[in-house]
Every structure is written in C-alpha cells, then in structure tokens.
Amino acid sequence: MISFKNVSFSYKSFKKQVGIRGTLKDLFKREHVNHTALENITFEAEKGEILALVGPNGAGKTTLIKLLVGLIEPSTGNIDVLGFNPYKKSNKYLSQIGLVMGQKSQLTWELPAIDTLHLIKAIYRIDSKDFTERLNYFLNLLNLKDKVAVPVRKLSLGERMKFELIASVIHYPKLLILDEPTIGLDIESQRAIHKFLLHLNQTEKTTILITSHYMRDIEALAKRIMILINGQIKYDGDIKQLVNTFNKGNTIIVKTKSELPDEILGYKIKRGSEENSWEILLQAGESYYELLSYLTNNFQIESFHMKETPFEDIIFNIFTETKESSS
Amino acid sequence: MNKYLYVFRNEILLNLTYKGNIISSFIVQIIQMITTVFVWRALYSGENDIGNYNISEMTTYLILTSLLSVIFSPNSAFRLSNLISSGKLSILLIRPYSYFFESFSVFLGQKVVQICVVFIMIICFFLLGLFQFSFPNIVSILLVLTNFILLFIFLSVMGELSFWLIEMWPLRPIYNGLLSLFGGVMFPLDLLPESILNIIQFTPFSLFGYVNTKAIMGELSDDAMFNFLIASMLWIIFFQIIYIILWKKGLKKYEGVGI
Amino acid sequence: MFFNYLKIVWSLSISQFFIYRLTSVFVCFFGVLFTAIEVITLFVLYHYTDSINGWDFYSFLTLSATYTLISYIYQFFFTLSHEKLIDKIVEGDLDYDLVRPIDSQLINSIKQLDIPSLINIVIAIVLLCFSVPHVLTGHIFGIVMYILFVLMGVYFYYLVNQFFINFAFWIERPYQIAAIPEYLLDIASRPRNVYPPILHILFVWVFPILLSTNLPAEILRGDISVVTLVYYLLFIILFSFLVRIQWKQALKKYQSAN
C-alpha cells in the first residue's frame, strides 16, 4: 500500500548576509547550505495498518508526510502509494487519501462546517444520498448533530477537530494521514477521536498514519511505531517489542518500618519521596522474586510494588540518547 | 453540483458575513469620489464643455470610475500570500482540483457581491440625478468582460510574487496609485495630451478604469473598442504565460519551506 | 518632565525606524507617489481654467500641501500611539498606563513617533515654499498666523481621532469607526466652496473639519472672516472638553468592567 525505497530529501537554503552591504552581496552571489531532512528511508505499510510516526521536532516527520501526499518530490529514491507516484498529484490518487493537520484548518472559519462539507462533497464527487447517510452516521458517532449549522469560529477546539476529521474521511479515503490531530485537545475529545479512528480502521480497513507528540495517542491507536530521528528511521516495529527492547528497567518501591542499607544483593537502594520508602532499580527482564524473599526475611516490609516505566519515558530516553550520541 | 460552483457559492456566503467590510469600502470610495466630483463640477460655469465632456457626462464618468475601482481593487492578489503564510495552500494543493480554477471561482464569488452593490449604487445616483444612463452594445459588454478576466489574471500574477516577497502590503498602495492615475479615476485620461494618452491608454490600469468606463458610457468608437479588445486579449495571453511560469517556479520554492 | 519623556520616545522611535527601514523606504516612496498624483491632477484641472471658485493654481496647491502637512504632522506624533491604543482597549490591556504618574490620555497619544512621516512633511514644506510666494498677500504676519492655524488643525485632527478611538471602549469592533477621521480629512483636502450647500454647512458649521485645512490657506490669501475664525476656535475648545469628558467616562467604564 505504502512503499518507500531509499528515499532521501534534501533542500538548499540561502545564507542571508547581515546589513545593507550583506544584502547587496546576496544579490550577486549567495552562499547556500544543503540540509538533509530525510536520509535513506525505506519502509512499507500494509492495507489496514495503523502506523505511528514519532520523533522530536525537526526529525523529518512533516517532510515524510509532505512526500506521502505529493507536496514535495524526493531527491532520490522511490515512493509508491496505492500504485501511484504521489508527486504527480493525479486526481485519482488525491481522491483516495485524506489529510488532517492539527494546526491547519480546512474548514472556513466564518461559515458553518456543513458548507465546507458540501464543498468537499462536490470536489470528491460523492453521491448525494451516500453523502447524507455517511455524514449523519459520523455526526451521530461524534455527537455533533446540533453543531453542524454553527459557524466554525463558534465551535470548541474539540468540536472543530471532529469536523476536520469528518471532512477528511467523508470521501472514503484508503489512506488517512493525521499530523498532530489531538494538539491542544482535552482528554474527552482525544478519546472520542481515538474511538472514531479505531472504528474507521476496523469497519473500512482504512490505513492510518499518525504523528503525535502525545504518547497517549500512539498507545491507544497503533500497533506499529516508527521512530524518526535526524531524518533517519531509528526504530520500526511493534510497540510492545519496543518497550521490551528499550525499557532499561522498572523501579520497585518498598515501604518499610526500619532503615534499609545502601545495598542489598548488589542492588543500589535509593531513598524515596516519602519517609521509609525506598526505590530499587530492576533491570528489564530480571526477576524480583529473590529480592522480595530477601527483603521479607530480613526486614519488616509494609508494601512492595513495581512501577513500570511509562511509555512516554521510554520514548523520551530514546530521543535524548540519540541526541547525546550524535553530539 | 459542480465543485467550482460550490467554491463560488461558499465565497458568496463568506462575503455576505462581511457585510460591514463591503459597505465601508464603498463608503470610503464614495467619499473620495465626492472630493473629485465637486471640484470638477466647480469648473463648469454655464454650458461650457471640458474636453469632450459636459457637466453631466463628467459626473457620470467620475462616479463610474470610482465605483469600478472597488470592483477592480487589488484585494484578490493577497489571497495567495495569506494561504502561504497560514500553510493552507497545502490543503488546497492536495485536493483533486485545479488551484487556478478554484481561485477563479473565489474571485467570481467576491466580485458578484461587489457588482450587486455597484448596481444598487448606480441606481441611487441615477435617482439623485447625478448619473446618465446609456445602453452599452454587445461589443462594449464583451470588452468589459475581457478586461474583467484580465483583472483576474493580472492579480493572480501579482499574487504569485508572494512566493518571493516577504512583504506584500506595499503592492496595494502602488496598485491603487497607478489605478487612480493611469486608470483615470482622478480625471478622464482623454484630457491629457494625445501623445501621453496614446502611451497609457493601453496599459492594464487604463483598461480597468478609463476604458471600461468609456465603454459602459457608450462613448467609444467601434474602431477604438476593437483596438482595446485586442490589447486586452494580448495582455491576457501575456500574463497567462507569466502566470504559468511563475506558478511552476513558485511552487518549487514553496515546497522547500516549512520542513 | 514631559520634555524628557518626549526625548526618550524620540530615541526609541529612531531605533524602531532602523529596524523597519525597508518599510520606511516604502512609506517615503508612497508619499512622493501620491503627492505626484495630486500635482498632476492639479495641472490637468488648471489646464482648463484659471480659477476654481476663486482658487487659482497656487492657492489650490497651497491648500493641498496644507492638507498633507496637517495629515502627516498628526501621523508623525500620534498615529502609531493611537493604533496601539485601540488594540490595548480591545484587549483590556490599559492597566499599566493608568497607574503611571503622567496623564493617561497624553501618554497614550504619544508613545512612539512615526519617523517616515517626516519625509512627507518635508515634501509638503517644499511644495509650500514653491506655492506660498504666489499666494501671500498680507505681510509676514500672515505666515505666523498660518503656522499657528496649521498647528491648530493638527490639534483638531488629533481630537477627532481621539474622539472616534474612544468609541472602542463601548463598541466591540471599533476598527472601522477609528478609520472615519481619515476620510473626513480627505474631504478637507478641497476648497470648501466647491461643495454643495448641505455638505458645506455640515462640515463648516456643524463639524468644522473643512476649516482645519481651508482656514490656514485662506489666511495666507488674506481673506479672513472673523466670525468663522472665532467659531472655529470656540468649537475646538468645546470639543477638547468633550473629548476629555469622554475619556474620563471611558476610563470609568474600563475600570468597572475589570
């Protein structure tokens, strides 16, 4: 469905000189700098897959999306989506994709959403009866029935985003691309959007590619995650596997009635936030039985529990690690 | 319904939500018109003619150029720059339609509303006894329509400059200044010496203001109308070619930003 | 004290000017362009006549230049501050200015000077140097009176602007109302006796915006009507009080709305 083969994208930018003399110099000879936004990207995605794309700012996520929808042409390599070269921007291709950009609206601010939806119906040549049914279905699903005639500027951010979603999927796209769709939304709206996307994916086998800074989105939606750092794919695979691979360990929190020594069985023991609570770092995959039995035998234990490292922290660690190793 | 028809319809709806802006732009134009009309009328004492104009022809001329300059305002040229700076151009580009025709539909939507207001105004001025009606013939209607298309293409090319210019606003006063001078908004161009008139009457600005007004007033000879029609069409072809070239180059430039 | 304040405002404006120097170049260019259009129009007009209701070419040119002068002196001192003031009122952002030990109306009228306008002022003065010798009938005293009444015109125009801007305290979308003074002054760019009686009465005896530009030019020509002059001065004094009261009321409204 989507296939990137050794795709790179680089662009030139001009160095701007300072001051009047510099501006004059620029007129005649401009120094340019080459930037590589994406380097040797290869991946494939199957129909019906939900693929999450994450990475720090400037990693190349937006560039990848632009390549995917055909707004830019790769410098080298081949892109094939649904059997098309996206850059040719054939109407046949464009009719089969949908795009949601969290920070750019396709709805006309002053008019009710229904006017934009009618426009989209005409652009994508959707049959009238079909359009009405599908729209009503979506409006019910997203609880927007009585908002459809309200000017967009009077809608809440969540309601607006839901309409953006409808506007991007009303034409049965086979591929739906979401760039930061939940930015700035409250949890309730975020959940509604997750539910809607999963529903769409299950009922229509829509392939979904999503970027987000909220790991909540990624965890709720995607099985497969692709991590992009400095224009390169750092990880591409199952989320669960990612957690197993990159999780450095889990923290065990112990509450006792007495003091603990600095070290037990080779584990370093740190003081916790509360009185008489202690933190012990356990390597991923290590069993805690030995530790537990040693503690219960030698000390008076009040409680013992394991805190899993949140998904967000794991991703954050990957980001920062790569940064440190590259600098 | 056709997709471009929907763009057109939505643009009309959008313009109607900005009634205040449309009305105020006409009020501004009428105030500026008052300052020219009464000065010119003060030049007439009794039955004298100025150039080829008697007092009611002069008044009609000045009212018409003034109202036309609202329709032939440079506003549409700034749409692309807004689309680029808000990033919304990307959304339009990935829709299965042509940006050129989409923007033409938007343009028509805006103009329909303005043209309606102009008609209402003309009727008002007529009832006040300040406007002389005449019935334009087919060729003059054709000429005005051609100039109207020229306006769209001219402004589109102007708008394309926003791919390269950071500041677009200076183009507005430049355009307005040129329109009021070469478009004959301040005075009929045929009051100028013939040598100067011959140079400037075929510029797009003259076609927008002076020529359109004279055509609507039915004061152009068949020969003159034919010449202006040819000039207008040649301009259209010229700017259309420029448009296509700049569009290709501009899009390449646009693709490079915001990565 | 106020003089020191003005000095600081001046130096701040200068540095702003250098940051936006490209914009400033454009503004200068437009000043020249529109003056050129005005002069060309006058040439065409006076090709067909020697006098428009008693105004010959040079006195009309003097009037045009006076209009430009008043308009740009206002712009130089007040326009940037007034633009900011509207935004501040709309966003409810006036608090700082109300606690300063300086008059709040004054501080909000002179915050930043519009340096590029100086060029347009110079253009107007050059035009005047060219036209005034042909117009001046009385003695040198006429020029002193002229300067006095130009400044009066600036003050009047300032009041008109302040008056319309103050509506922002009561109205939700004030930007269009705030643009009205500019168009009123446009009307004043022409000799007052070209207008039909209704407009003449309206803009001379009801709201004397026409006098702000016409009086200085008429003084140079030597036709002074004492009645008009006295009326104009009285109107400005009364209007000053009105704008002052309006400002106080507006602040009350602002503070209670907080």
Image: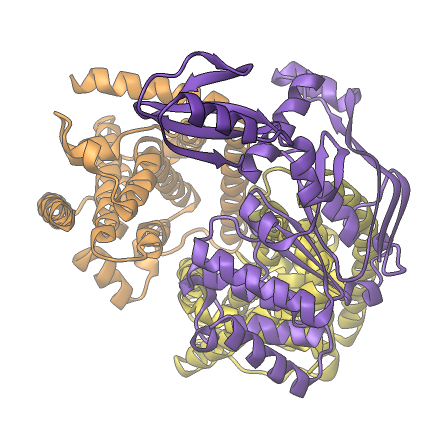
Identify which residue is drawn at 61% across, 25% down.
Answer: A320
Q: What shade does chain B have? A: yellow
Tell me residue B208's x, y (percent): 65, 62
Relative to B136, say whether C60 is above or below.
above
Residue A300, position as x, y percentages in the image = 35, 25
- Direction from residue A27 to residue A147 in the image, left or right: left
Image hue for chain A:
purple
Name the foreground residue: B38 vs C257.
C257
Q: Quadrant of residue B102?
A: bottom right
- Front residue of A105/B169: it is A105
- In the image, A34 versus C169, the foreground residue is A34
Give coordinates of residue C136: x percent, y percent: 31, 34
Viewer can see residue B144: no
| Identity of the residue furthest to the top in this view | A262
Letter of the orange chain? C
**Farthest bottom residue?**
A129
The picture places residue B258, in percent across and down from the top left corner, at 67, 39
Identity of the residue drawn at 70% across and 33% down: A245
Image side of residue B130 versus residue C54, left or right: right
